[in-house]
Amino acid sequence: MTMPPLPQAPEFLSWQDVDKLIDYLLPQLRGPYDALLMITRGGIIPGGLIAEALDIRQILTAAVEFPQAGQGRFVWPNFVQFPAESLVRDRRVLIVDDIWAHGRTMTTVKGRILAAGGRPETAVLHYKPGTSLFRESGPDHYAAVTDRFIVYPWEAQRGPDQANMRALQPN
């Protein structure tokens, strides 16, 4: 029997690390964008930084929940919050999140914007192709590729003990 590899230690980022990631991401983003959609909660801070840097004034949010573990990864999401179709139809929308781990949330949000007649592009700070459920696609723009469990500086409630416990739990 082959044992699965143990997860690597979490990577704790500083605000300076985040600044460097944003600086690397910004030149990839070829505006103008009509709106920026931040995926809650992870996309709020990078989305705000990007919106400020690119002078995007139409800021939208989306909150998506997936059923708890044990119900499978390919289940219908629950859109807790999503902008009205009229806010994305015929508009170029930059969707921002902190990380693309499995890709479910970003892919779901992108699909809903496409269905509403919008033109979405996706951007994340970290892309984890090794855990992505969408092998044929990934984010349109990303600052770094990783296989680590990332802890961002705004995740203040996550100490090293909690991060290690989360890293060992399946998503």
Image (spheres, rainbow, N blue to C red):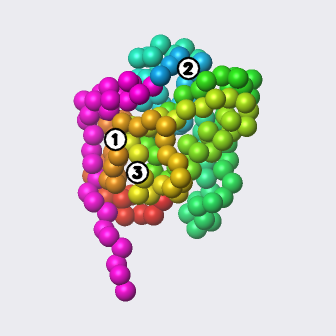
SS of the residue under disc 2: loop
Residue neighbourhood size for the residue with mark 3, other residues' Cα within 10 Å, grouped as few (<14), some (14–19), many (≥20)? some
Mark 1 → mark 2, Cα distance in angstroms: 22 Å
Query: Residue 17: horizontal and vertical position, in percent?
Result: 26, 34
Q: Residue at x 55, y 43 (%)?
A: 106
Which residue was labeled with disc 1? 144
Mark 1 → mark 3, Cα distance in angstroms: 9 Å
Query: Residue 79: horizontal and vertical position, in percent?
Result: 67, 42
Earlier sequence position, callout 1 versus callout 3 = 3
Position above or below: 138 against 141: below
Residue neighbourhood size for the residue with mark 1, other residues' Cα within 10 Å, grouped as few (<14), some (14–19), many (≥20)? some
Does residue 127 appear anywhere in the picture? Answer: yes
Any magenta on residue 17? yes
Does residue 162 appear anywhere in the picture? Answer: no
Mark 2 → mark 3, Cα distance in angstroms: 25 Å
SS of the residue under disc 1: strand
Q: Amino acid at mark 1?
A: Ala
Query: Residue 34: horizontal and vertical position, in percent?
Result: 60, 18
Residue neighbourhood size for the residue with mark 2, other residues' Cα within 10 Å, grouped as few (<14), some (14–19), many (≥20)? many
Any magenta on residue 101? no
Determine which of the numbered discs, if any, sits on residue 128 in the image.
3
The range drawn in magenta is 1-29
Which residue was labeled with disc 2? 33
Q: Residue at x 45, y 35 (%)?
A: 141
Q: Amino acid at mark 3?
A: Lys
Position above or below: 65 against 75: above
Mark 1 and 2 residues: CB-CB less than 8 Å, in contact?
no
Q: Residue at x 58, y 68 (%)?
A: 70
Earlier sequence position, callout 1 versus callout 2 = 2
Q: Residue at x 66, y 58 (%)?
A: 75
Earlier sequence position, callout 2 versus callout 3 = 2
Q: Quadrant of the N terminus?
A: bottom left
